[in-house]
Image (cartoon, rainbow, N blue to C red):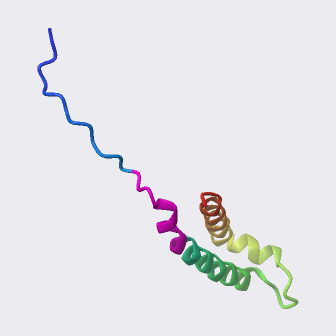
C-alpha cells in the first residue's frame, strides 16, 4: 500500500551559522557563575586554618558535587569555542 501522506518540504537547518559567536557572552557569564560557586563552596568546606575540613566537606557533599558539575559544564562550553 503506497504512502499517501504528503511529502514535507525540507526544513531549514535549526543550527545557527553564528551559534558560537552568540554563545561567547554566555561562556563569560558561566565563568563568573563558576567563580561565585567556587567561593561559596570554599566557605562551606574550609576550616579555621583555611584548609579543607573533611567533616565540612562530608556535610556539604551535595554542594561540592554541584560545583564539580558546574565546573565541568563550563569547561565543556569552553571546548566548543
Compared across the picture, whether 19 is left or right of 50 comes to: left
Horizontal and vertical percent position of residue 54: 82, 73
- Image spot of residue 51 (x, y percent): 86, 82
In the rendered image, residue 3, in percent from the top left (x then y), is placed at 16, 17
The magenta-colored residue range is 15-26
Q: Is 66 within the magenta?
A: no
Quarter of the image where one finds residue 74: bottom right
Q: Is residue 69 above or below residue 8?
A: below
Q: Residue at x 66, y 67 (%)?
A: 71
Q: Position of residue 76 (x, y in %)?
A: 63, 59
Q: Quadrant of the C terminus?
A: bottom right
Q: Residue furthest bottom?
A: 48
**Foreground pick, 20 / 44:** 20
| The magenta stretch spans residue 22 | yes
Residue at 44% x, 56% y is 17
Query: Residue shown at 65%/70% (left/top)?
Result: 67
Indicate whether 6 appears above or below 77: above
Secondary structure predominantly adopted by residues drawn in magenta: helix
Report the residue that reaches farthest toward the top. Answer: 1
Amino acid at each position: 500500500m503506497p504512502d499517501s501522506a504528503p511529502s514535507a518540504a525540507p526544513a531549514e537547518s535549526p543550527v545557527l551559522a553564528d551559534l558560537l559567536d552568540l554563545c561567547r557572552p554566555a561562556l563569560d557569564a558561566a565563568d563568573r557563575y563558576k567563580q561565585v560557586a567556587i567561593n561559596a563552596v570554599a566557605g562551606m568546606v574550609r576550616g579555621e586554618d583555611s584548609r579543607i575540613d573533611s567533616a565540612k566537606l562530608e556535610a556539604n557533599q551535595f554542594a561540592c558535587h554541584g560545583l564539580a558539575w558546574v565546573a565541568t559544564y563550563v569547561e565543556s562550553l569552553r571546548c566548543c569555542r
